[in-house]
Image (cartoon, rainbow, N blue to C red):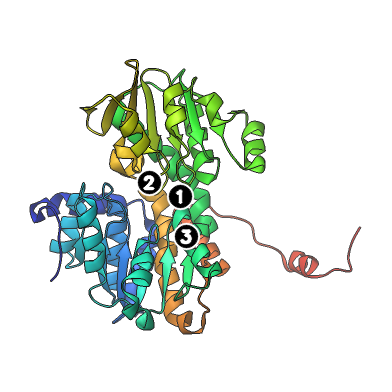
């Protein structure tokens, strides 16, 4: 069995963490039970590049119980929970290649090893597997049915590949499912980002100017939670519609150049590069805290900060203090990587339940329809989205109304008006 994890002796702790998370993942549990009976994934080889968390562990178990041969690697060098990686290897006999804090060379070596069984389906969070397959492992392309993508950044990369007609197999954009981005991105990112900032700094957010760069679903959720913690929220945007929405939601909206001198905490959630740059660092007040909750660590121009700094020291785990000219300090959290996973545990299991239910059922859809799909990015089928929402409501003890036959007829007709 091929694997590379920190320490197998951590497996008991990881097993308990996965059991705890499973209690808040009833939709995935129903899918796991179904997979266990039907074995719809029998013989299917899956390579997954996801954050190695307790929630991901439960998804891997469901896929294996369904008959799949799964290999898992981390989608971020700081997002791995080593105890979960150990448990998946020792208790579930799943090949895992992930160590929290691994260097860049190890990270890419692990990606390569996760492809060692010639996958038929890829499961990405950021499109790193797809990128490697299309650059250095094109020999694998003929055998791949399709893939799934978990996050906004990855979907953006994949749509770019599809537009340029270089995408070698169909991808289902799990991120775009309503039961994913409306809940995972908004409620999950909103809560877990604050969790990571608080674990790293132990700071009081009440009364602070909390600057959010990007007002997509992640930014909206973060703004909601920061306001609830008592912060004065400032939003920076490039999209006039999103900026208008932030203003109508009651937040201050201004360019980053104006926010830099007044902000106490800055968080990037754009999916783009260099949204906090040298000129912004120079304007920040002494003691400013800078963090990122976008997928890649390019949103903050860390090379510019390194070049600008006169000194650097680690003052707390996940807090690097940079001393700028004049003696002012700027604190970078989690090396600019996803702070909710670098310093905390990522999204709560309750929201990941829906995200990973989408992943599992999208794989099933690829098995059934992959060979007939074009080489482009597809949404999660609406029927899957609705099924997951219905299962989630049922697990919460919530019932809803149904259309009457007369209402259905009215909606389907066009003659009946006023």
Cα distance in 3D space between marks 3 and 1: 20 Å
Res. 393 in view: no
Q: Nearer the viewer, mark 2 or mark 3?
A: 3
Q: Nearer the viewer, mark 3 or mark 1?
A: 3
In this picture, residue 363 sits left or right of residue 223: left
User: Whole-percent x and y of residue 378?
Assistant: 53, 69
The structure residue drawn at horizontal position 38% and vertical position 48%, both measured from the top left corner, is 296
In this picture, residue 360 sits left or right of residue 110: right
The structure residue drawn at horizontal position 53% and vertical position 40%, both measured from the top left corner, is 214
Q: Which residue is mark 2?
A: 347
Cα distance in 3D space between marks 2 and 1: 7 Å
- The image quadrant that residue 94 belongs to is bottom left
- Identify the element where label 2 is drawn: loop
Mark with earlier residue (3, 1): 3
- The image quadrant that residue 407 belongs to is bottom right
Return the mark for residue 94: none
Q: Which residue is mark 3?
A: 157
Mark with earlier residue (2, 3): 3
In this picture, residue 209 sits left or right of residue 132: right
Cα distance in 3D space between marks 2 and 3: 23 Å
Mark 2 and mark 1 residues within 8 Å of each other at the beta carbon: yes
**On-image quarter of the C terminus:** bottom right
Q: Residues within 10 Å of mark 3 (few under 14, many from 20)?
A: some
Q: Which residue is mark 1?
A: 184
Mark with earlier residue (2, 1): 1
Question: Which residue ends up furthest to the left in the rendered image?
Answer: 9
- Identify the element where label 1 is drawn: helix
């Amino acid at each position: 069995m091929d694997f590379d994890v920190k320490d197998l002796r951590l497996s008991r702790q990881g097993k308990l963490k996965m059991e705890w998370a499973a209690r808040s993942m009833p939709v995935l549990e129903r899918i796991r039970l179904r997979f266990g009976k039907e074995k719809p994934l029998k013989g299917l080889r899956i390579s997954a590049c996801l954050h190695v968390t307790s929630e991901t562990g439960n998804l891997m178990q469901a896929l294996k119980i369904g008959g799949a041969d799964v290999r898992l690697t981390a989608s971020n060098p700081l997002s791995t929970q080593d105890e979960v990686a150990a448990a998946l290897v020792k208790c579930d006999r799943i090949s895992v290649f992930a160590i929290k804090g691994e260097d860049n060379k190890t990270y890419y070596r692990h990606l390569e090893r996760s492809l060692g069984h010639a996958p038929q389906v890829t499961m990405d969070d950021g499109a790193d597997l797809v990128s490697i397959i299309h650059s250095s492992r094109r020999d694998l392309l003929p055998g791949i049915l399709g893939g799934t993508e978990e996050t906004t950044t990855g979907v953006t990369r994949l749509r770019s590949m599809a537009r340029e007609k270089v995408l070698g197999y169909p991808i289902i954009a799990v991120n775009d499912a309503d039961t994913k981005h409306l809940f995972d991105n908004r409620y999950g990112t909103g809560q877990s980002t604050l969790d990571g900032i608080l674990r790293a700094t132990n700071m009081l957010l009440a009364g602070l100017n909390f600057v959010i760069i990007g007002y997509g679903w992640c930014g909206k959720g973060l703004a909601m939670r920061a306001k609830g913690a008592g912060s004065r929220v400032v939003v920076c945007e490039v999209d006039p519609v999103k900026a208008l929405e932030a203003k109508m939601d009651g937040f201050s909206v201004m360019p980053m150049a104006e926010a830099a001198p007044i902000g106490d905490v800055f968080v990037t959630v754009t999916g783009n590069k260099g949204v906090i740059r040298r000129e912004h660092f120079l304007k920040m007040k002494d003691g400013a805290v800078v963090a990122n909750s976008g997928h890649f660590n390019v949103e903050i121009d860390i090379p510019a900060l390194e070049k600008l700094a006169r000194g650097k020291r680690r003052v707390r785990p996940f807090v690097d203090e940079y001393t700028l000219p004049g003696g002012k300090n700027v604190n970078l959290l989690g090396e600019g990587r996803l702070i909710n996973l670098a310093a905390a545990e990522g999204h709560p299991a309750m929201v990941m339940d829906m995200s990973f239910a989408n992943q599992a059922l999208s794989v099933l859809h690829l098995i059934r329809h992959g060979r007939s799909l074009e080489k482009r990015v597809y949404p999660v089928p609406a029927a899957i989205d609705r099924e997951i929402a219905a299962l989630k409501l049922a697990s919460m003890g919530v019932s809803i109304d149904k259309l009457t036959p007369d209402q259905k007829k009215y909606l389907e007709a066009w003659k009946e008006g006023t």
